[in-house]
Amino acid sequence: MSDLTFSRVVEDASEALSLALDRELSGHAVFTPQDALLLDGDGAGVVAFADGVPTHVVHTGTDRGGSAALADLAEPGPLRVECYAGEDGPVPRTDRTAVAPDTPADRLAGDDDLAARTRAAADVEDATENVDAVEAFLADEQKVEAIRERAREEAAERAEEWGFEDLAED
Amino acid sequence: MVEAFAVASGKGGTGKTTSTLALGMALAEDHDVTVVDADTGMANLLFHAGLADADVTLHDLLLADSDATVSDAVYERFGLKVFPCGTSLADFRAADPDRLRDVVADLAADTDVLLLDSPATLSSRSAVLPVVLADRAVLVVQPTIPALSDGLKVQEYAASYGTGVAGVIFNKVQDPAAVERVAEQSERYFEGPTLGTVPEADAVRAARRAGEPLLAHAPESDAAAAYRTIADAIDVQDTAADTVADRFRNAVVPEQP
């Protein structure tokens, strides 16, 4: 069973894919180009996600899958995104519909940063399932302190940029 | 007397909204609690609180030409005052963040605990603002390297802007014994204590499907019990309501990204 967790019109495919990635959607999302609504409907793209990473795609108008479905869906402009959480959904998880993690970001949005973030998320899922790796990370005091230090520097820099200077501590 | 908490994670998918409502309900046993969807760009709270059909939301109060009042956008649900955001992109665009400060300042005057469900990112100033405004942050992390790294980043941002850390919640935990060790090890880096660990549970997913907070949908579940323990571990400070309200009113106004 799938449940609707989110529905909104967004500006472009990059924003739509970012939404799913940031919320680590496991389930599927329906991308309906708003032009299609106006033009009496050419179908929608349905993308399956695992932890925010796209895995399979079909297009309801052309019934094509994978990269071909992305080509059918690729048009600029706003689209409605409906996110459904849950294992099932209208996307068959087959070779015909499979896509690489970064392909939708590349083909639909031409967004290199998003493609890189999606690849990283896909790798991360493999790398951090086990607690041993997390413990090893926490044991590396230098590494963790470096992360904290960098964040403090970033926060201080941005304080200025964002107009929070009065709050930032030296 | 009021304390404002930002429930924050720096990373999506850690169960922040579930945690916000669960903490809110648990804290509501002893306090008057108001929950605000401070993630104005990505409305989420309404789907968790059975408010998907809410007519008036926070966004309506943030529109320059709005005649909606605070009382129109507050929903009394599950023993809480819930303040959801709407899902309209147009309303979000038109929203004036200057008004958010004032709205939240008004709320602070009339509650004991203010929980701000904060955006899962540090990438814009409107996303960071709830952490800036809060007295303390509650960090929701999963026992993974990226989630812990992001939790630490939020902590450092919070500290840089004078916001403390109330503690850390380990959420969606699959192996509680192993995560005990992780939590223990992480304590030397976090400025607040480990408040508790919440098991990964079907009850949480079922609650979300039902559009109900976990503590309303499955009050007897282990996950619900974990959130009650966590709420008990938070010692709510009494800050004068006008101090908090003033801080909100005087906070810098973020521009739209």
Image (spheres, coloured by chain):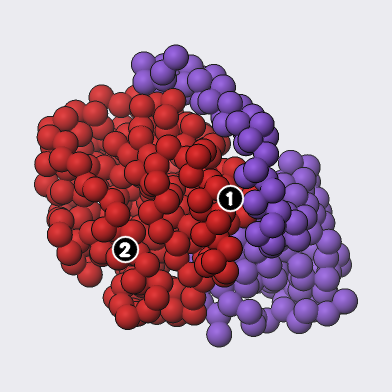
Chain colours: A purple, B red
Examine the image and state in which quarter residue B245 appears: top left
Q: Label 2 is placed on what type of residue?
A: Thr
**Residue type of the residue flagged with mark 1:** Ala
Give the left or right position of residue B169, taking residue B241 as reference: right
Spatial separation of the CA atoms under disc 2 and disc 1: 22 Å
The chain holding disc 1 is B
On residue B102, the disc is none
Q: Residues within 10 Å of mark 1 (few under 14, many from 20)?
A: many
User: How far from the left and from the top, in percent, is residue B32?
Assistant: 15, 55
* Percent position of residue A25, x then y: 60, 64
Q: Residues within 10 Å of mark 2 (few under 14, many from 20)?
A: some
Q: Secondary structure at mark 1?
A: helix
Residue B163 lies, in percent from the top left, at 36, 32
Q: Secondary structure at mark 2?
A: helix
Q: Which residue is mark 1?
A: B147
Vertical position of residue B222 compared to residue B180: above or below: below
Residue A39 placement, left or right of B41: right
Residue identifier under label 2: B229
Coordinates of residue B213 in the picture (x, y in percent): 34, 70
Q: Quadrant of the N terminus of chain B?
A: top left
Please name the residue shown 51% across and 71% down the image: B200
Tell me what residue is drawn at x 40 percent, y 46 percent: B193
* A127 or A27, nearer to the observer: A127
Residue closer to the observer: A71 or B34? B34
**Which mark is first along the chain, 1 or 2?**
1
